[in-house]
Image: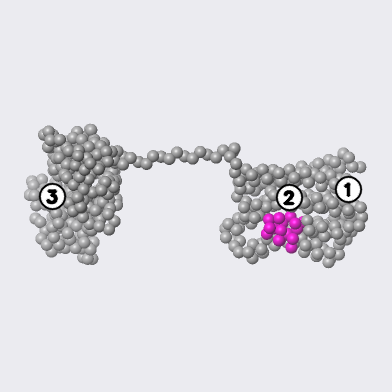
Amino acid sequence: MAFADGWLIDGTNYQYRIVKVIGEGGFGITYLAKRNDGSDVVVKTLNDKMQNERDFNDLQAKFMKEAFFLKGCKHPHIVKILDICQSVNLWCMVMDAIDGETLWERVEKKGALPESEALGYIQQIGSALEYMHNLDEPLLHRDLNPKNIMIRRQTKDAVLIDFGLAREFVQDKTGKHTAMAFPGFAPIEQYDYNAKRGAYTDVYGLAAALYFALTAECPTPSFNIVAGVALVPPRRIQPNIDGRVEKAILHGMKLKASDRPQSVQKWIDELIPPPPKLPKPPKATVRQTSTSSIIKNSTWIALGLSFTIYAATGIALAIAQAKSAVWLLLVESIVMISLSPLVGDWLNGLEKQGKLKGFWKKFLVVFAIAGINAILSTLALNQVAIAYDKNFSFQELLIIGAVAWGGGGFGTLAATWSWAWAMAWAVAWGMLAGTGTWAVAAAVSTSVAMNWAVTVAVAVAAVVAGSSEELLESVGKWKATMILFATGLAALGVGLLVKVLFVR
């Protein structure tokens, strides 16, 4: 019994009112319906012919089972099953109503389609079939033809519809199948009740649909080919079809199932070869010149200069017979220089995290660090003065500290915060100069200050300036710290060795 116009079907969550019949095939009948929220849907049931069959109950059980399978299909190019419901003992499949036209209607209206357009539709339908064929319980469409391919009006996407003959399959397994077919688009096994079927069955229908889209003519039916009527090659109808495309169509429409591609994807790859894999770019070798290697060379140069200056400073202190306080001051400078990569990396990290945005925030943090250095340098210089029976007045200490703090702050912003020490020492020596010993000490202080400037400015300045990536990549902050510390101690050892062996 066909539903009359206006018939009301109670669904799971909605009601559907039949508007009109929009199609009927050998298996089912399709209606346009209105959902009670106002949207259009499509309702499909078994047609009157199937309802009059003796095994109608079995047919309906299969229809219902396959409807539930299809409801679980989630693919952009397969029509969406919205609901499965029953009306007057007749199971109904409610589907999304697609605003557009069938591939058949499009070709009838426009004639043979451009190759790029047709291939786009076939690729999309191919992906839908490949999805169906690879489900846990695979499904064959078995009724693939241009009337079952919809083209959306807005997006021009192709959507596979009308699964009236769809059913489960095991590749190449012989079983009893419904012997129905659309002439010209069905392979020969579709006409045999007991024939084997597989993914190659849908390959034939897809290749035939492409034949039709490119030529605007239906291909020769497979039963006529068996009878001796040859399939007309598509390029004989449309000479501008690409030779590769024609070859793929003819391969997909081979009469014998075993002669066709055994999966849709294999056929699509013949039709549209996948893009070639680009070779991976060769890995950079250590011989290549890079910014990192230049920085690494500069670092080694700075370390060499540091060692030389430290050693010269130690030898000068040994010759001047400097007291322990002066030696400790040199050790302190070594420690501070060695810690510079860590401090600089910390500042750089704060800036990357957005915690050091703006000039004034950076300014305040930098001057806080410079203040700590200023206090340490002032205390150290005071200990040197005491060791030589000299005294700084409170005002003199303030001047030394202010010079160290200001110079250190601005020096840090310029990535050369070593000038804090250089200026503080220069002021201190100027205040205490007057004896031969202090003249030597002044020379020593100048050497140490120069060492600080060269080491920090060349080897570590990139960190403080925010360009530390290359330096840290080539050396690493912890390794840089240990190398600077080891270099300073080794050079200090040279000075102590001179003192032990040569100075009495």
Disc 3 marks a residue whose amino acid type is: Gly
Q: Describe the element under mark 1 as helix, strand or loop.
A: loop
Name the residue nearer the viewer: 264 or 372.
264
Q: Where is residue 391 in the image (x, y as percent from the top left)?
A: 88, 61
Disc 2 marks a residue whose amino acid type is: Val
Image quarter (top left, top right, bottom left or bottom right) of the C terminus: top right
Q: Describe the element under mark 3 as helix, strand or loop.
A: loop
Q: In which quarter of the image is residue 299?
A: top right
Q: Mark 2 points at which residue?
A: 454
Question: In the rendering, which numbered label is found on residue 320?
Answer: 1
Name the residue nearer the viewer: 502 or 92.
502
Name the residue nearer the viewer: 104 or 395.
104
Name the residue nearer the viewer: 290 or 176.
290
Q: Position of residue 291 (x, y in %)?
A: 61, 46
Q: Describe the element under mark 2 as helix, strand or loop.
A: helix
Disc nearer the start of the sequence (3/1): 3
Image quarter (top left, top right, bottom left or bottom right) of the N terminus: bottom left
- Check residue 414 for magenta coloring: yes
Q: Residue at x 86, y 64 (%)?
A: 393
Q: Mark 3 points at which residue?
A: 25
Q: In which quarter of the image is residue 19?
A: bottom left
Instruction: Give the Cα separation between the discs numbered 3 and 1.
Output: 112 Å
Q: Residue at x 15, y 61 (%)?
A: 18
Give the extent of the magenta segment: 406-421
